[in-house]
Amino acid sequence: MTDTDLAAQLAETAGRILLEVRDSGKFEGKALGTAGDETANEFLVQALRDQRPDDGLLSEESKDTEERLSKSRVWIVDPVDGTREYGEGRSDWAVHVALAIDGVASIGAVALPGLDGGLILRSDNIAEPAPYDGPPRLVVSRTRPAAEAISVAKQLGGELLPMGSAGAKAMAVVRGEAEIYLHSGGQFEWDSCAPVAVALAYGLHCSRIDGSPLVYNQEDTYMPDLLICKKDWAAKVFDALGR
């Protein structure tokens, strides 16, 4: 099984598990988010240790160790990206499974189990989004939109689209439902590695908001900011940011 097949299969299965946990009716709200995180994480971690025992592993829901830092290949997973949205019964949450190779988000799958009966976007299965020639649509946090994104939208005459998880926002750009995802409120490697791997495969621009590359499998997993956008908007975004 290829790495991408594995990533997609694990993301899809974890998504099904999460729907079963939610549909069980045994948990609500924050307790549902906790149960979903723990259950999906146990599956993903055990499956990756079984299928790729020599690779490193970083998961939001597992204790980090220094072992991964010596590895060229490191799996980076987020069992539930958008735990709040998942716990609220919304659709804008995701499952991330990615493989970083030498610090680059190289292979990834993002499952969107709550959308259209469950969608899987993967880094080796590219679909052309529908053409769009209107003002740019910027996906932003539904609870704390970044000031930089609001400013860029105003300068470019764009429209803000509030949305939940990072994966849902990034995949909105991949799917052609938005042009720009600009985040400056801080994230961690598991929030963006799989979405970036998929977005790069789709030919999108992915970087820090100062234009520097996104580097994964770092000792400090915090990532201050992120820009994913269609390539023809990148220079305009940087101009609007004053970069």
Image (cartoon, helix red, strand yellow):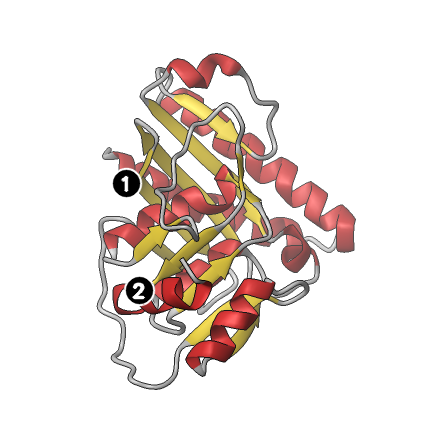
Q: Position of residue 230 (x, y in %)?
A: 30, 65
**Taking 33 as reference, is 116 above or below it?**
below
Give the CA distance from mark 1 to mark 2.
31 Å
Q: Compare residues 51 and 69 and report the one nearer the observer.
A: 69
Q: Is residue 86 left or right of residue 47?
A: right
Q: Compare residues 108 and 181 and report the one nearer the observer.
A: 181
Which disc, if any, is residue 63? Answer: none
| Residue at 42% over, 27% down | 48
| Residue at 35% over, 40% down | 7
Question: Which image quarter holds the N terminus?
Answer: top left
**Residue 203 is at least partly visible in this image:** yes
Q: Is residue 24 left or right of residue 125?
A: right
Give the mark nearer the N terminus: 1 vs 2: 1
Q: Nearer the viewer, mark 1 or mark 2?
A: 2
The kind of residue tagged 2 is Ala
Residue identifier under label 1: 4
Q: Are marks 1 and 2 in contact (CB under 8 Å)?
A: no
Query: Where is residue 91, by image quadrant?
Result: bottom right
Q: Is residue 27 left or right of residue 228?
A: right
Specify few, some or many for label 2: CA neighbours under 10 Å numbering under 14, 14-19, or 20 or more.
few
Secondary structure at numbered mark 1: helix
The kind of residue tagged 1 is Thr
Q: Position of residue 212 (x, y in %)?
A: 36, 44
Residue identifier under label 2: 235
